[in-house]
Image (cartoon, grey):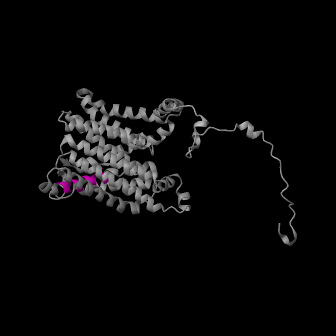
Amino acid sequence: MIKFYNKVKNYINYTVIGVFTLVFAIISLSGARIDSSSLYLFEKVSISIILAVSLSVVVGFLGELSLGHAGFMCVGAYFGGKFSVILEPVLGISVPNLLLSILVGGFVAAICGVIIGIPALRLRGDYLAIVTLAFGEIVRSIFVNTSPESFGGTLGLATPRFKKEYLFIFGFLMVLAALFVIQNFIRSKHGRAVTAIRDNEIAARATGINITKYKLLAFTISAFFAGVAGVLYSFSNTKVQGANFDYNYSIEILVMVVLGGMGNINGAIVSATLITFLNTKLPTILTGDFAVLQDLIYALILIVIVIYNNAPALKSFRARFNIGVLIRKIFRHKHNPANIRDDSANWDEIPTKIEMNEILSVDVKPQNLGSDKPSKGGKQ
């Protein structure tokens, strides 16, 4: 059972999201009515998961701080939205229109990632964070100051609204596509090179890893899926406005990644879902005189989660009570050496066949391997 768990644990997120998408897709396509607010929440959750997982490539696995993720999303939203407007007279608000717009928005965002990444990724730490933050603000300002005929200007770009009954399905399909690409990238030799750069850039350079190449590759993949999320955002709203992609939104995406754990894809998925749920439901629950408590309660929830995940006093509690421990207890079984036919390199699952005290009790007698004196001619 342990071997089975080790094989399927990398596909748990696919399974959960796939089952969720399939169930609600069947409900929606069968004509059953799903609340409009729930459909909109599903759309926002799918967009947030794509943003968190894509930013995790740069922040979690590459180890660089980027504060311009909303800028790449803004590029994808505007270019993808504009392309959908151009295609609307020919294709209407249809699936081909959506898919082509996603490709265009993601491709343009990836190009921006390359253009910004070549000079910016020579910087590190706070300097890179400042440059990416400046990029996000510059992009937003450019779109806000465009003409109404091009990208809408200050009033925003009017975009076609995809049907709520179907858009969340494509949103979660894009989540599965993002997970497939990013997780396979991280497990490949390119992903191992990226994590080596994060652990020790000097040692990685000394072993022959092309630092600039792999940093740029991670940055481009992250920007592409941020652009995809931007296109989904444009189809989820009737208007794209640059004011919605300010630095506060980049900080919110970064909080999703940090809250879920650096380099933890499943944690980023859970935290993105939680934060999106809180941002969507708190304004509807706390109304009237209690509306002033929305930000306070939201901040308190985040503080409690961060303290639980990082407080040294709770380390033993987290080690004893977590999902991983529960799963291992469920799948735990006693090892029988007679039933082991092939170790498959899983050394942690092979019981020791010789007791340690037997090894320590072995007498090792030195043998005469020859004289230490050099022979004639200086040879030994």
Q: Where, by quadrant of the figure, is residue 303 drawn?
A: top left
Q: Position of residue 159 (x, y in %)?
A: 17, 50
Q: Residue furthest left?
A: 89
Can residue 240 be spotted in the picture? Answer: yes
Would you say residue 97 sits in the magenta stretch?
no
Taken as a whole, is the magenta stretch helix, strand or loop? helix
Quadrant in the picture for the C terminus: bottom right
Residue 5 or residue 317, whichever sits in front? 5
Q: Position of residue 245 (x, y in %)?
A: 28, 49
Q: Residue at x 52, y 52 (%)?
A: 199
Q: Position of residue 73 (x, y in %)?
A: 29, 51
Indicate left or right for 106 with 188 as reference: left
Q: Residue furthest bottom?
A: 377
Q: Residue at x 26, y 41 (%)?
A: 43
Indicate left or right for 237 with 107 as reference: left
Q: Position of residue 269 (x, y in %)?
A: 37, 41
Q: Residue at x 71, y 38 (%)?
A: 356
How many marks overall? 0
Indicate left or right for 265 with 138 as reference: right
Would you say residue 79 sits in the magenta stretch?
yes
Vertical side of 143 occupied by 293: above or below? above
Indicate left or right for 81 with 267 as reference: left
Residue 70 or residue 194, whichever sits in front? 194
Can residue 50 be spotted in the picture? Answer: no
Report the magenta residues as a range: 72-84
